[in-house]
Structure formats: C-alpha cells, structure tokens
Amino acid sequence: MNLTLRQLRAAVAVARHLSFRRAAAEMHLSQPALSTSISELEQALGMTLFDRTSRSVKPTELGVTFIKRATRILEDMDRLMLDTSSQVQSHQGRVVISAVSSIAGRLVSRAMLLCAQKFPALEIEIRDDVATQVLQAVRSGEADFALTVEPARLEDDVVFEPCMEDPFFLVCHRDHRLAQRASVTWSELEHEHLVALAPTSGMHRIVHGELLRRHVNIAKSTPVSHLSTVHGMLETGLGVSILPSLALPVPDHPLMIAVPLEPRLSRSVGIYRRRDRSLSPAAQGLMEAIHTVIETRRERSPSGPFERLDPAGTPQIRKR
C-alpha cells in the first residue's frame, strides 16, 4: 500500500470543508485533480472515505476514524518539519571536534566563543590529543570532524580541507645567543639542543624532515608529549624549539621569544572529516565559526601574536 502525504492532506481538507470545491481551492488544485487523489486513496485503502451526493459530501463511519488518524499523522509530520527546520536555522545540537592541542587552544577556543554568541543552543565537546589520536577519533566516528595538521598520507575514505598556513619559528630563552636576531637560518641551528614534541605529534614529521633535508645536525633532541612541557623547558634555558605560530608563547613573554626562520617553513592546518559522513547543523555551525576566526587571523600580520578578543568573544584585529 502506497499512501502519500498529499493524499492524506486532500482527505483531511475534504472532511474539514465537506466540499470538494473548497478543499481544492485550499490545496491549490483543480477539483478533478482533487477528486482523482481521493479516489486513488480509497482504492489503495480498499474502502470508501466519503459518501457523495450532488448536494453534499460526508465522511463514512470508517472515513471518520481514518480522518482522525490522518490528522494526527499530518500534525506530527508538520511538527517534525518545524523542529528540524528550527535546528537547522539555530545550529542546535551537539558536536564533537577533535583537535591537536596547539590548535584547540588558539583556534577552537575562539570559535567556541563565537558560537556561544551566535548559536547559544550549540553544545560543543573538544577532544584535544596528539595528531595520530585526533585522526583516529574521526575515522572511528567518535568525532564529527577534526581541526588538525595535514596528514602525511590520506586514506580514500577521508577528506582534508586546508584552511590556513601556520609558519614555524625558533623559540628560545631571551638570553639565548639567537634571541635578538631579526631572523634565523636553519643552518644556524647546528649543534643546538632541540626540545621537540614526540613523533606522535604532527609537528615532529615536518620539523625533523626539514632538518634532515637541510643536513642540520642537532646536538641532542629531547622529545616530550605536551606543548606546556616544551614551554617549561625553554623557560629554564634548556635548549631551543621549533614551533608553529599557533603554539608560540604569549606575546611579551618575560622569558621566551620567537624568532622567524629562514627559509620559511609552515604546516597546513585544516578540516579532516570522513567522506561518507554528512555534517550535522551543529557541526556546520562550529565549522562556520572556525572559518571566521581563521579569516580574522588572516587579515592581520601572519607572524604576529594572536589577535585579542573583545568581552563578547569576537575576534578583533589588532591595530598595528
């Protein structure tokens, strides 16, 4: 049995008006088209819904019961469509985003502030981790999408959409021999003690690959798991590090300083998601906020500290 919503609406309209002519006008149909729709519905049901005479239209006993149930179905359907439309417009719902720690702290946090202002019904859960685990969270379906570094290899079932280039800097103690330089070349890092994030980090592959390509011999490398540990070691003067702009210490840090590297090296930061999974309105709302934050960052100097925020959480372009 194949019934359509249009047939149900036609039957309810006829029962409400007790007139094919008025019901046809309400549904913007010709009277013959409406009559055909009712006849097809009755044939599908194997029952007569309306007793018709030249002067009146009246639901049969079975028709009265059917019309009551059809009315409830249509009301539920209309309510469903209204609720769904409301969720789409307000980006209501829950979204889980996976992100490497440096990006979560500097980008996702600002996107959350924007969402709180623009989409207050949006619930966001952040899962910050090392790059390998961030990618796995998306592939397993635990996260709707990830904001991460472009992976070295991209499987067929996932998509990476670049959003920004994040340049690397030399970061060291202010007393270090290279601290006051306008820029530092890679060859000048020869025989330095490098404090670096572990191989599970997306930065490790990029930085160590560049050092190998340029034949720079590091005296010693100390891998750690967390960015806060890198900063802590640099504050004590233990070695140097190569970090992207999103992972730099705060501007005017009393102990650490960031110096541009030449030639420039950057990492590609973007959206990583499953190809076979459509994004929910909630996820689309968060992604929209992320793009807004990145665009604000792009409008200012890419080598400066991150923009300040106003009390409402809207990114503000720092005046030069």
Image (cartoon, rainbow, N blue to C red):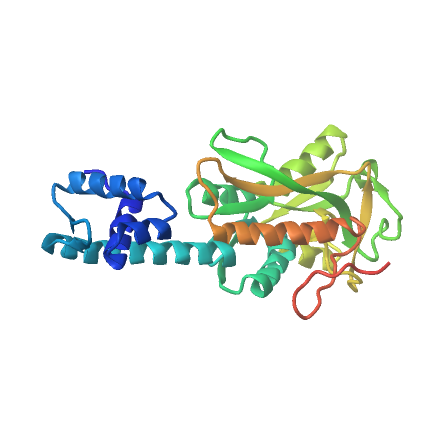
**Residue occupying the point 54% across, 31% down:** 154
Question: Residue 113's quadrant in the figure?
Answer: bottom right
How far across and down, in percent of the image, does residue 47 sit? 12, 44
Q: Is residue 291 shown above or below 154?
A: below
**Residue occupying the point 17% across, 53% down:** 66
Q: Is residue 316 in view from this perspective?
A: yes
Q: Residue furthest front?
A: 54
Q: Quadrant of the N terminus?
A: top left
Question: Which of the pair 136/67 is nearer the observer?
Answer: 67
Q: Quadrant of the C terminus?
A: bottom right
Question: Which of the pair 213/61 is nearer the observer?
Answer: 61
**Residue occupying the point 16% across, 38% down:** 43
How far across and down, in percent of the image, does residue 62 sit? 11, 53
Q: Is residue 301 left or right of residue 295?
A: right
Question: Which of the pair 93/216 is nearer the observer?
Answer: 93
Q: Is residue 226 in view from this perspective?
A: no
